[in-house]
Image: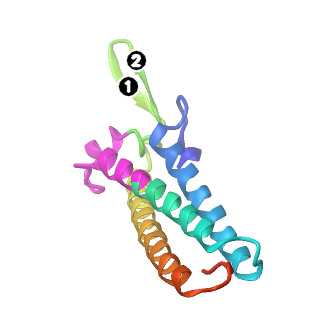
Amino acid sequence: MAKWQVFGSPPATTEYGAFSGGFAFLIGLLGIVAVFVDAIPAIIVAGADALAAILTLAAGIAYVVTMRGVNCNIRDDTSSNSLINGGSVDVKNGPPIAGYDNDNPGELVGRCKKAEADYAFMFLTFALSAILVGLGLLTNGRRSGSKGMV
């Protein structure tokens, strides 16, 4: 979504969403490594999963709040939303100029659908991370060793 930004820098919501997704990906890699490396305690992996869960939940909520009230099929909704419109510049004695193609009405609808998919995946990542935390804590108490888990 940052690549859509024509005017100004991407919204903080977009940047935070990218950060939380990247962080969750790295924690997933840590979990995979922990399966094979005994030196990584399961509690560390569970703690990292918990942090990933919190970060992705916050990102999902931020997206939902920013997208609140936006109907992807209503151009006025999508053209005025900071996550979707690519930024805007105020013009003296005229409407603001936004970072989308006025001649392509489907562009904003596509961006809107992608933004909705982004927050759905953020909540899915939160749910998966939360499940992994629970499984990690349950299995950690039953293990004698420190082997990590997925």
Q: Is residue 30 left or right of residue 115?
A: right
Exactly how many numbered labels are in the figure?
Answer: 2
Identify the residue shown where x is 67% and y is 71%. 41
Image coords of residue 108 (percent x, y): 40, 51
**Secondary-structure class at tag 1:** strand
Give the residue type at disc 1.
Answer: Pro
Give the residue type at disc 2.
Answer: Val
Is 99 drawn above or below residue 112 in the view shown?
above
Is 8 drawn above or below residue 76 in the view shown?
above
Image quadrant where residue 33 sits: bottom right
User: Which residue is situated farthest in the left direction here?
Assistant: 69
Q: Is residue 146 left or right of residue 78?
A: right
User: Foreground residue, 89 or 9?
Assistant: 9
| Prevailing SS of the magenta stretch | helix
Q: Dot 1: within a 10 Å radius of its alpha carbon, few (fewer than 14), some, or many (20 or more) residues?
A: few
**Secondary-structure class at tag 2:** strand
Residue that mark 1 sits on: 96
- Residue 91's label in the rendered image is 2
Identify the residue shown where x is 54% and y is 53%. 20
Identify the residue shown where x is 49% and y is 45%. 14
Image coords of residue 149 (percent x, y): 62, 81
Closer to the chain start, of discs 2 and 1, is: 2
User: Which residue is situated farthest in the top direction here?
Assistant: 92
Q: Is residue 47 left or right of residue 62?
A: right
Does the magenta segment cover residue 125? no
Region rendered in magenta? 58-81
